[in-house]
Image (tube, grey):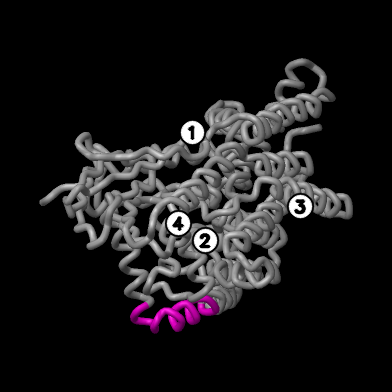
Amino acid sequence: MTAANPSEASVWNKTDWQIASALFIVTFLSRIPFRTTLFYAWDSVLYARAIDHFDVSIHQPHAPGHIFYVFLSRIVNLITGDPNSAMVWVSVFFSAAAVAALYWLGTMMFSRHVGLVASLLLATSLSFWAYSEVAYPYTLLAFLVTAFAGLIYVAREGKSARFILLAALFLGIGSGFRQDMLPFMLPLMAYGLLGMPWRRWVAAGMLLGAGVASWYLPSALLSGGFAVYRESSANQSDYIIEKISVFGRGLQAIAANLHDLGLFSLLALAAATPLLLVFLAGLFFPGRRNVRRDGRLLFLMIWTVPSILFYIFIHVGEFGYVFSFLPAALLAAAWGTANLAVMIAEKRGDQKKAAGIFALASASVIFINLMLFLVLTPSLSANRLAARDGILRSRIETIRENFDPGSTFIVSVFDYQQAAYYLPEYQVWKFDPLEDSYPSTDLPEGVERVVVFENYLKPGNNEKQDILPLDYDQRLVVMYPRGSRHIQVDWPSRTVDITDE
């Protein structure tokens, strides 16, 4: 084994097809036992409602809509008959597709060894595996950016008009599944076109525009027209800019975004984090000039930097957001490990040991990743996913079995959409802590009890209450108005009070 130099990138052959197919099948099968059965998050419910009726003006789903993802899930739903199950199967399929695509890209860029290790790191990534099991489109995002990057790399290396034009169309259509793909990957599109004739730029631009039009037009028409669609998209953007980004919250936003980005990246990289850190630190060593000048490093940077800057200064709202650059980060980690193995072997005077060192280091990291998801209980592990599913089911069943819909009022925040979807006969009140830290509302006539749906909200000290046990050592708090008809929430202290005011 030698360092992963540009000249050593593999030529795709029958063996690679077999390896990629095996990676797809194993990844797909590994997801089946851990699939969740209830909607994982707020947006999952919005997508489910959009499967029935797409209209971003009523947040089905939120703008810009991801219409191709919704329609793909709608097709799968015809088979499953359950929107959550349909979206989970989409997540399962594209997690396997992303792993196979990363093997292809890693093999073409570096070597079969680097491609294999990078793909296995992705398959066993803690958050990537978790999001393969829930109703969310983020494993699809990982596949899209990886496949697109592969098309660009092949086009740039071969100066191929066919691949660059295919990449342009793929980017346009792919952004109909995840619109954030478009701004994040446009710089890589431009990089792929560098040095090509202007006619190719024009042709690529036309195909990109046609791809965008293929989702923009139906999204607007199904949402009440172009003016309504633009307004809905603008409202969504304005909310993020005002409430979350650096332009609305200043340095506080940067600090919060950096914290979340660091946490989300750590859960995505999992045990591969040290490998990436060693690679990044090594770039500053005097003897690593050849890596700093390597065009593949520039390629990975153009891939990752746009989304990272957006997440720092604007918004990084979900664990799955980092999948836009996770495949590139894992390629860098595997590449760096291969180079480090060669350096260690050379210092020992036996280059034949490089392959063994690389295999041992990679296998250790992959084993730890497997332990994190399958055995241990960090955030997003298999145990935690099952608990999340079980707790939500227990809350829903306990409410339905014990309380009359006409006399029960449910208070919820981040699980509001799940409560409203699974308990449609009940009155459910939600509030946005970013909009109002002290929200309040009047109790409707006939309400005899208030149920606090989430455990992070607790009743005030003077409230009459019952506590019902739930699965996984959780509890359901029930409060009684005693003549008072007003709900007041103190979000900073996470308390709910029933008052006369």
* Kind of residue at disc 1: Asp
**Does the magenta portion include 220?**
yes
* Kind of residue at disc 4: Gln
First along the sequence among labels 3 and 4: 3
Work out how far the residue at label 3 is from the one at label 2, CA to CA, in angstroms.
Answer: 23 Å
Q: Residue at x 54, y 29 (%)?
A: 281
First along the sequence among labels 2 and 1: 2
Residue 464's spot in the image, x, y percent? 25, 40
Q: Nearer the viewer, residue 375 or 297?
A: 375
* Kind of residue at disc 2: Met
SS label for mark 2: helix
First along the sequence among labels 3 and 2: 3
The residue singled out by tag 2 in the image is: 181
The residue singled out by tag 4 in the image is: 418
Q: Is residue 378 visible?
A: yes
Please say if 150 is above or below 114. below
Q: Nearer the viewer, residue 56 or 316?
A: 56
* Kind of residue at disc 3: Phe
Q: Residues within 10 Å of mark 4 (few under 14, many from 20)?
A: many
Q: Give the residues in magenta.
A: 213-228
The residue singled out by tag 1 in the image is: 473
Q: Residues within 10 Å of mark 2 (few under 14, many from 20)?
A: many
Label 2–label 4 contact, CB within 8 A: no
**Does the magenta portion include 19?**
no
Residue 441's spot in the image, x, y percent? 20, 57
SS label for mark 4: helix
Q: Residue furthest left?
A: 501
Q: Residue furthest top?
A: 348
First along the sequence among labels 4 and 1: 4
Work out how far the residue at label 1 is from the one at label 3, CA to CA, in angstroms.
Answer: 37 Å
